[in-house]
Image (cartoon, rainbow, N blue to C red):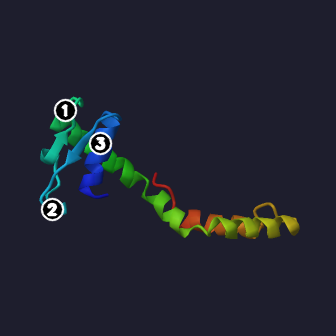
Amino acid sequence: MDKNTKITNAIKELNADAEFIIRAASADAVSVDGIEWADGTTPIAKSDIEAKMVEVQTAYDNKEYQRTRAEAYPELKEQLDLLYHDMAANKGDKTGEWFKAVKAVKDATAKPS
């Protein structure tokens, strides 16, 4: 997750209605020091934003397996086709091809403990 996204997500979690822009000379220079609050938005303390950024990053990191699985699963139309053929063959259980395909992805990218 890039720093701009992290800052934006942290601010929005602290105040969903906050209006602001983040100014930086380059993508590498993005920081909480570049936040400009729009009229009417109460500024949020930098320390609060930075603490929330850590939480946002941790939550993002903890869901890595979900992003990996989402890319590895067969497309939905393929899954539906597998389900159709499984049902037609009376294999709507753990012996069906759909179940095997989904289980293979889940086994390859297990949830963290």
Q: Which residue position is annotated with label 2? A: 26
Classify residue 41 as left or right of residue 111: left
CB under 8 Å between callouts 2 and 3? no
Residue at the front extreme? 39
For the residue pair 112 and 53, the one nearer the viewer reads as 53
* Disc nearer the start of the sequence (2/1): 2
Q: Which residue position is annotated with label 3? A: 10
Q: Which residue position is annotated with label 1? A: 43
- Number of numbered callouts drawn: 3
Identify the secondary structure beneath mark 1: loop
Which percent across, then down, holds residue 6? Answer: 28, 50
- Which quarter of the figure has residue 61? bottom left
Which percent across, then down, holds residue 86? Answer: 81, 67
* Disc nearer the start of the sequence (3/1): 3
For the residue pair 22 and 45, the one nearer the viewer reads as 22
Identify the secondary structure beneath mark 3: helix
Gap between marks 2 and 1, in whole Å? 23 Å
Tell me which residue sits at (21%, 29%) in the image.
Answer: 42
